[in-house]
Image: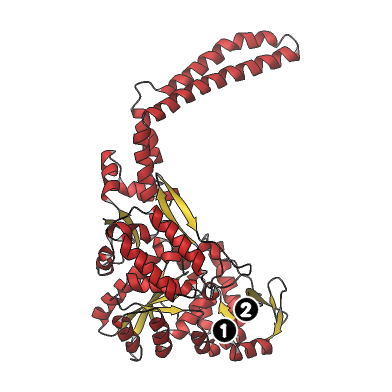
Amino acid sequence: MANTLIKLNQGWQADQQTFENIDKLRDPNSVVVIGGQQAGILSGPLYTINKIISIISFAKQQTILLGIPVLPVFWIAGGEDHDYDEVNHVYLPDGTDLKKYAMGDHYTERVSISNRSLDKEDAVQWINLIIRELKESTYTKKIVTNLEKHLKTADTFVDFFALFIHELFAETGLILIDSDDKDVRQLEVSFFKDIIQNQPVISQDVFQSLQTMKTNGYHVTVEANENDGHLFIKENNERILLQKMNKIWVGKNNECQYTEEELLKIATETPERLSNNVVTRPLMQEKLFPTLAFFAGPSEAAYWSILKGSFHSLSMKMPPVLPRISLTMVEQKVLKQINRYNLSLTQVINQGGVQSHRLNWLKSQSQAPVDEMANQFKRMIIDGHGPMKEVTTHLSDDISQFADKNLELLLKQVDHLANRINQEFKRKYADHLNEFDFVQMHVNPFNGLQERTWNILYFLNIYGDDWLKDISNYPFDWKKQHYVVYL
């Protein structure tokens, strides 16, 4: 494993600290702190950065505490992922909104991200577009130079991701691994065989655990049944999910079929054709690394909760699963608006953003309670209209229905007037309302945590990367999951 990691990280231009850590893996007392993510373009959403920070910081703390080598490892899930739309874009601010910038696709097949080559011409054009959208700063030129250098070196999305990550986390000793690397697959031969031969018990354990969780009211974002093979096979350059039906391994949509002997032969002779799913990736990870702790996001922690039996079926213990930290970056210009309107940062982050505060502030600017006045006016209309409606009940159905329609139109006109008044208030206070939207975009975009949408490039362009190194050295206590970083 150490030799394979040296080869991989050399290709990704890792620094000396990384290779020193890889060499420490040869120590039988060494352990790793590990976590993984998709190879998002320019690192993807901030939760990837947060996970890497968690891994690095915890490994440093445990090295001191335990007195043994505790090494930070990040597992690039290039072989377990073929959803290009999840990794091909970043969001950047555009006024008070976030705008999505996606790189084009030149593949028609479901190719794993590790095997997806970069179209250099498209990539250059996309990066140039991104850079134009950023405000030029003292750091912009350095960013452009580094990205152009990485593009020249990278052949695949995973390469580009790894080069970028090693640049960001230089001197931290971070070790990267591509799960779909051919040399890694050779190390996994015996483990693939174990998974194939133990499929019935693995699938049954996972299925039963999932049913138990659902019965107890827990939500797990994984579907499973007792026929699942929990492996993919590469067929005609596409990843096909396997199931086991009557002792025959078949594609989920009957694209292919293999006997167990044939699949074992593939595992032995061409293991690069096989890859794991969300169930078997943790098993393979534990087979390859002596794991002290695994850092997970919320969804990962949920599906790991059903894997204990599958670990035991392969005579392994499941490692401790720790929740990665969550960070919200708050710039001074954002903090200024938060303070100006007496907003609670905690509420803004955790309780659905600023829209309720925005509405209450707008109402407070008007001396006239427009909505209350409109409701009172409508009650007066209904009361005044009642006697006339009563007269129509003794006449034809047509005139009675006309009276109902007449009342409906009158009430709609009151609503229309109230809406026009409210719109005029919004126009009058548009600048203030935009400031609320500005805070929402930065701290709670799309009514979710910042880390799920924002990309680190925006912050690197304004603040450089020294702050990132400071955070990686921060002594997190791991009891608190969310931190605010003031920039």
Residue drawn at the location 72% of the way across and 80% of the way down: 257
Residue drawn at the location 32% of the way across and 84% of the way down: 21
Amino acid type indicated by mark 2: Lys
Image quadrant in which the C terminus is located: bottom left
Residue denoted by label 1: 272
Locate residue 445, reporting x and y percent.
42, 50
Task: In the rendered structure, find residue 92 and report the number of the disc placed on it.
Answer: none
Residue drawn at the location 27% of the way across and 66% of the way down: 476
41 in relation to 62, above or below:
above
Locate residue 229, reporting x and y percent.
63, 77
Residue denoted by label 2: 234
Is 397 positioned to the left or the right of 161 in the image? right
Q: Nearer the viewer, residue 262 or 12?
A: 12
Locate residue 380, reporting x and y percent.
51, 14
Q: Secondary structure at mark 1?
A: helix
Amino acid type indicated by mark 1: Glu
Mark 1 or mark 2: whose residue is earlier in sequence: 2
Mark 1 vs 2: CB contact within 8 A: yes
311 in relation to 360, above or below:
below
384 in relation to 289, above or below:
above
